Image: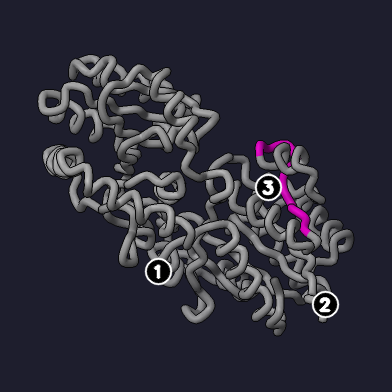
Amino acid sequence: MKKPKLKIIQVIASKGWGGRETVPLLLSGEFKRRGHPVALWTDPRTPLGKRTAELGFDRSPLGHRSHLDPRGYLEVRKALQKDSPDILHVHHSRDLWTLVPILKATSWKGPLVLTKHIESGVSKKDPFHKFLYDRVDLILGCSSMVRDNVVGTCPVDPARVWVGHPPVDTGKFHPKAREAKVLRKRWGVRGPVIGMVARLSPGKGHELLLKVASLLRGKFPKLTFKMAGAAAPEEIEYARKLERLRDDLGLKGRFDFEGYVEDVPTFLSALDLAVHAAPNESFGLAIVEAMACGRPVLARRGGGVEDIFRGKDPGGRMIDSEDPRSWAKAIEGLLKTPSALRSLARGSRGNADRFSLKAVADRHLAWYGQLLGRRAIR
């Protein structure tokens, strides 16, 4: 019996380029690989829109200019007529302002899914948000924390709010031992390497790690810290502040800012320990990417990160502190016990598989099938 195929539309008019924007691209690619007709509604002027075009996806223009923009409504109406979707999956709640009024005015009555990638800091339990959210059939929080935030801030039935973790492409993120050996040689390191992948932005934990490195310098003379990630244009001064702090602590040559790194899997594979020091992350995709590369991870407890560190072999540890001395003690214990690092590393890849693109796509297709009353969708 031939399995049914769905026309799936991923919707996001975001101008940014991060986890929220890469999730619909990854899902669309996997759905397309399985034979489902896929299209993306994006703003062609944005990084996501340009990337969508480069990858050859079917697409329709959707530009968010303001919450009440007649041009957006016209774009949605045209896209509905052109694409005739079975499922609409939105990745930015702001886009509901454009979508929902048109959907309520047309004959299209299919399921509307919303993924919330970040928590909201304001209450949305006003009449207009109730009008918007009443049309949403299923809301997916990217973590348990975000799901609970949606229930607490939005006018929704909690039974319609589930957890839908973002995917990691474990075909791209996997241990790259040979490439890592070459990279470590290029770095010129002779001891353990601790690293993090994060934008150079306040709140990501770089200042904490600088203080940790200062505390560990005397105990591990050959220890090196490597930070991958660039600063946004508006954050250049913050990046300079970090470099000044690094130099004031006497860590030049011991704590390196690598800037934008093209080959993140090789960077991660070259680390002895990956760290994630940001508090209250919505999820912590960089943690799963490090685990997919077979690296043990030490992460700050809190937020969506706690969804990752579950199971018998979570591939890492959490630390419930912002005190540099606590972090230094935890890292010292791991570095002095190589068997503990190896044990964590053995569990990391298996834990990451829970968030693999295949596993996440399977769950999404099952949810879509439930909304449509179908059960055999793959």
The residue shown at (35%, 53%) is: 346
Mark toward the viewer: 3 or 1: 1
The CA distance from mark 3 to mark 2 is 39 Å
Left or right: 236 in relation to 21: left
SS at mark 2? loop
Q: Position of residue 19 (x, y in %)?
A: 53, 47
Magenta-highlighted residues: 38-47
Task: Identify residue type, mark 1.
Answer: Asp
Residue 2 is labelled as: 2
Residue contact between numbered discs 3 and 1, judged by CB atoms under 8 Å: no
SS at mark 3? loop
The CA distance from mark 3 to mark 1 is 27 Å
Quarter of the image that includes the N terminus? bottom right
Question: How is colour applied across the structure in the image?
Answer: one colour
Q: Which residue is mark 3?
A: 64
Left or right: 278 in relation to 362: left
Q: Which residue is mark 1?
A: 148
Q: Position of residue 127 (x, y in %)?
A: 55, 71
Task: Identify residue type, mark 2.
Answer: Lys
